[in-house]
């Protein structure tokens, strides 16, 4: 059985990811978010009324930073974003985000109803480079 790498362990900890996208006028838009990493993609929950929803529907280019300001560790990841509108098909990922951050959750049907009522969508961020090329500090 292999143990997690320092990077995998870091990404599994409950912390925020700073999501950066590009506004229509070219300025960056950044926001902190809860996330989950499944080894292939980073997932972030948002609502249709938030700026990042509109930004990533228009332009999928994104950068992510996960940091630990106390331990002076971070990783920066170039990605592309996909907006997933089907809550029920992605309820397990919404659940994983909340569970990672210590939230108690209702059964899937009830959770899906809450997410739909909140007008939530899932953002799936796929890295554009292998993890060996991500900018890292304190994670080697």
Image (cartoon, rainbow, N blue to C red):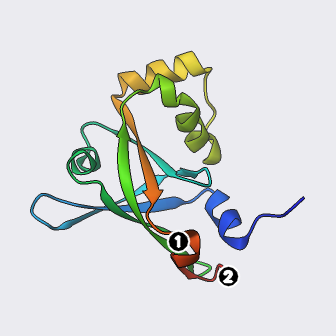
Of 78 and 30, which appears nearest the observer?
A: 78
Could you tell me residue 63's position as x and y percent? Answer: 37, 66
Where residue 45 sits, quadrant-wise, is top left
Looking at the rendered image, the disc whose residue lies closer to the viewer, 2 or 1, is 2
- Residue drawn at x 53%, y 29% is 91
- Residue under label 1: 67
Could you tell me residue 95's position as x and y percent? Answer: 58, 35
- In the rendered image, which quarter contains the N terminus? bottom right
Name the residue at the left extreme: 25
Residue 137 relative to residue 51: left or right: right
Mark closest to the chain's N terminus, 2 or 1: 1
Can residue 69 be seen from the camera position used here? no
Around disc 2, counting alpha carbons within 10 Å, would you say few (fewer than 14), some (14 to 19), or many (20 or more)? few
Where residue 117 sits, quadrant-wise, is top left
Q: Secondary structure at mark 1?
A: strand
**How many numbered markers are drawn?**
2
Can residue 82 be seen from the camera position used here? yes
Around disc 1, counting alpha carbons within 10 Å, would you say few (fewer than 14), some (14 to 19), or many (20 or more)? many
- Residue under label 2: 140
Of 119 and 77, which appears nearest the observer?
A: 77
Mark 2–mark 1 distance (CA, rounded to whole Å): 14 Å
Could you tell me residue 2's position as x and y percent? Answer: 85, 62
Residue 122 relative to residue 16: left or right: left
- Residue drawn at x 70%, y 64% is 9
- In the rendered image, which quarter contains the C terminus? bottom right
Q: Say above or below: 116 vs 138.
A: above
- Residue drawn at x 62%, y 20% is 107
Could you tell me residue 135's position as x and y percent? Answer: 50, 79
Res. 38 mark: none
Label 1 near label 2: C-beta < 8 Å? no
Q: Secondary structure at mark 2?
A: loop
- Residue drawn at x 40%, y 27% is 86
């Amino acid at each position: 059985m292999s143990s997690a790498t320092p990077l995998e362990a870091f990404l599994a900890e409950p912390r925020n990811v700073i999501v950066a996208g590009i506004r229509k006028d070219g300025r960056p838009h950044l926001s902190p978010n809860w996330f989950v990493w499944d080894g292939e993609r980073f997932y972030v929950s948002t609502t249709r009324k938030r700026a990042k929803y509109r930004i990533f529907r228009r332009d999928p280019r994104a950068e992510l930073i996960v940091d630990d300001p106390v331990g002076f560790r971070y990783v920066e990841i170039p990605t592309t974003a996909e907006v997933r509108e089907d809550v029920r098909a992605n309820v397990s990922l919404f659940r994983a985000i909340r569970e990672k951050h210590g939230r108690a959750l209702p059964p899937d049907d009830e959770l899906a109803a809450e997410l739909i009522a909140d007008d939530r969508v899932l953002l799936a961020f796929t890295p554009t480079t292998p993890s060996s090329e991500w900018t890292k500090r304190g994670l080697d």
